[in-house]
Image (cartoon, coloured by chain):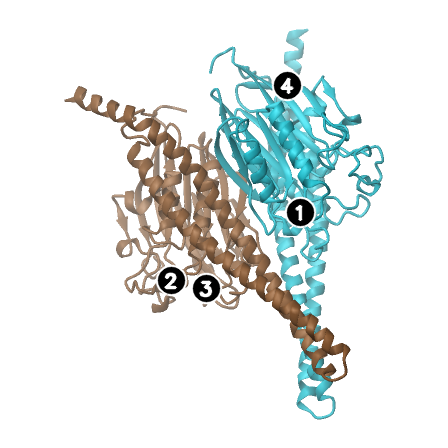
Chain colours: A cyan, B brown
Amino acid sequence: MKLNFSLRLRVFNLNCWDIPYLSKHRADRMKRLGDFLNLENFDLALLEEVWSEQDFQYLRQRLSLTYPDAHYFRSGMIGSGLCVFSKHPIQEIFQHVYSLNGYPYMFHHGDWFCGKSVGLLVLRLSGLVLNAYVTHLHAEYSRQKDIYFAHRVAQAWELAQFIHHTSKNADVVLLCGDLNMHPKDLGCCLLKEWTGLHDAFVETEDFKGSDDGCTMVPKNCYVSQQDLGPFPSGIRIDYVLYKAVSEFHVCCETLKTTTGCDPHSDKPFSDHEALMATLYVKHSPPQEDPCTACGPLERSDLISVLREARTELGLGIAKARWWAAFSGYVIVWGLSLLVLLCVLAAGEEAREVAIILCIPSVGLVLVAGAVYLFHKQEAKGLCRAQAEMLHVLTRETETQDRGSEPHLAYCLQQGGDRA
Amino acid sequence: MKLNFSLRLRVFNLNCWDIPYLSKHRADRMKRLGDFLNLENFDLALLEEVWSEQDFQYLRQRLSLTYPDAHYFRSGMIGSGLCVFSKHPIQEIFQHVYSLNGYPYMFHHGDWFCGKSVGLLVLRLSGLVLNAYVTHLHAEYSRQKDIYFAHRVAQAWELAQFIHHTSKNADVVLLCGDLNMHPKDLGCCLLKEWTGLHDAFVETEDFKGSDDGCTMVPKNCYVSQQDLGPFPSGIRIDYVLYKAVSEFHVCCETLKTTTGCDPHSDKPFSDHEALMATLYVKHSPPQEDPCTACGPLERSDLISVLREARTELGLGIAKARWWAAFSGYVIVWGLSLLVLLCVLAAGEEAREVAIILCIPSVGLVLVAGAVYLFHKQEAKGLCRAQAEMLHVLTRETETQDRGSEPHLAYCLQQGGDRA
């Protein structure tokens, strides 16, 4: 790699709100999005909530000249909704489906039926290895009473772990997507602390777009006050995050968002706002300064966020176990009822009533059995994330304990030398 | 890393057949296994089918002095059954649950209820980064009519992709586990071709154990003739696979298997045989010889196995779609029946019969709905693996086409020079 190597990367991200039969003006929005992407000629366009594979194929055809490579990430019953269009050849593709993603009986929310995932693309740009990730986490339907909180924290952890373990050979890491988390939310902090990713909105000096970088704004005609909850001026839940891993430095030169309508008309692309970032990557030999690189301060931030996450997962585990135990009791109760009904059916007196009641009793036992198994699986998934976090926590605490005294001495000595 | 660096790694692998209430002599086998592992003092012991977390905790306690670090991989409703005991500190842990793992209505086989996974451990041994993977794929219940064939191929692909993407920074890669595939099976070839892993049994010059390295043998008192199917002399489905990624060379010095009983008594540890390998790792600067390193021959092997796998997945997709379509018809038929029954219930004549029949009709629609959704998800999972394979195939074919002529010219020239 040349010493004066540099590269500009223009990235587009949008949660497309492309739900067949439910989303408004899908065809028109997809057409306008295609035209815009063709016109802007980004390096990468990463999309979420493209729930219709036909719409992906439509976009693929429409964008084939400007973005010759594309991929649709399939998973779950409905799909992951994730897809990507690239100006550069995609070298490698991989996908990780989150273990936990809501509850099947909350079918009106629908998240469980989608295979919410993280998609990975590996690109080689003039010798630079770029790992680009696209994701969409579980929606937050109520800020006050968020029954999916533990699942979203577990998803954020799984996402962070997936990035951590698959990006070890990358020069630059890029994560775009709808995290369904506000910037200070626990899952968001966990993700940033464990991966070291930087938030383009926080880092850039040239931002143009909606107030506070919000990606769901009241000005957007598809957004209702209910969507924004206790944040009437808007929420920021879609992100462009990045970092340089090896001998590179990356910064966000510019970041733009749409502001309730697409840049060339008065109509929006989606109920979310699009993010458009220009990243500048340059060669930069690694600087070993133990006072700045992963020092005790960063370590203590990670440790504190891991502790908080473990506590929240613990609450989730207790809830999952309560439901498993409750459905276990219902199974026992239902089976006892069935035995009683069989005894009654064998007699003469209430034979017909007993036979009729047998059918809903069998149904009850089956439903309770399914609920039991589901919550057992939920508890196992949460325990798994908690155990992985405990492992990291133990290692980090050990490193902190071992390193804090020599590190402090070194920093003080360096400070003295400089003075 | 020193130029004369070398390291010996002693590894143990066993499918423990530890199923609560079903497996015979569990307590005794676990006790003997604990004693044996303590006595042998391996670097790593990787276990499958430890379905009881209590048994893992028992082993953990029993092995705590010899193997201070351990991890149990939780997932699914029952668990992944995977766990590991390590003499060295485990630096990092990650887990990937396979998207496809059989059918929920085949509850007598039970695989769907387990969260079949691949577990990853990162260890640092005298500066060497070792990525150790442990896994257990879907069982093969019938060799002649294997309804899980496509799922196992998809799992093998997911496993290969997981290893490929998470081991890029590793010096040595080790995979142990019960693959439920014979050495020449499609999934096994796919795994080896895409990851470049070597089979310890094939590579070692010092093998002691059962004939042909079989890991299920008729001599084992827990193995029935039915388990071996058309292979009465035994099958080899458990593996130790390895490779060196960067500036290292690894070879298998010795490989042993148990032969129907544990080495210190006349009773077996499990219905599977244990594998014990000694790997020798040494520093070896990379040798760039385009005639041997990933040449056209290896590429053409990969291309041919990928093509075969895509065909098999295609058959699986067609079957999944057939079931989805069939259950779709049943839903329509059931709903029509329900409408008819409602009409009858509104009248006088067959009111009671109609009301009674309503309940099983609702049940039928619900079950058909679940089957429909399940097979939609199955088709999506298989399509995903197929699309990823197509992507690799396209890249590999392009590379082969671009590289074959200059490569051939280079090899011929080198041959001439040597002559």
**4 and 3 marks in contact (CB < 8 Å):** no
Determine if marks 1 and 2 fall on one subunit: no
Determine if marks 3 and 2 fall on one subunit: yes
> Residue B24 placed where, x, y %?
45, 68
Indicate which disc residue B28 carries: 3
Which amino acid does the dot numbered 1 rest on?
Answer: Pro
Left or right for A239, reference A126: right
Q: Secondary structure at mark 3?
A: helix
Determine if marks 1 and 3 fall on one subunit: no
Q: Is residue A223 above or below residue B211?
A: above
Indicate which disc residue A61 carries: none
Of the image marks 3 and 2, the number of the one nearer the N terminus: 3
Q: Secondary structure at mark 4?
A: loop
Q: CA distance from mark 4 to mark 3?
A: 54 Å
Locate residue B303: give its quadrant.
Answer: top left
Chain of the residue on which disc 2 is drawn: B
Residue that label 1 marks: A20
Q: Nearer the viewer, residue B408 or B97?
A: B408
Q: CA distance from mark 1 to mark 2?
A: 57 Å
Indicate which disc residue B268 carries: 2
Residue that label 4 marks: A291
Which of the two marks, 4 or 1, is nearer to us in this view? 1
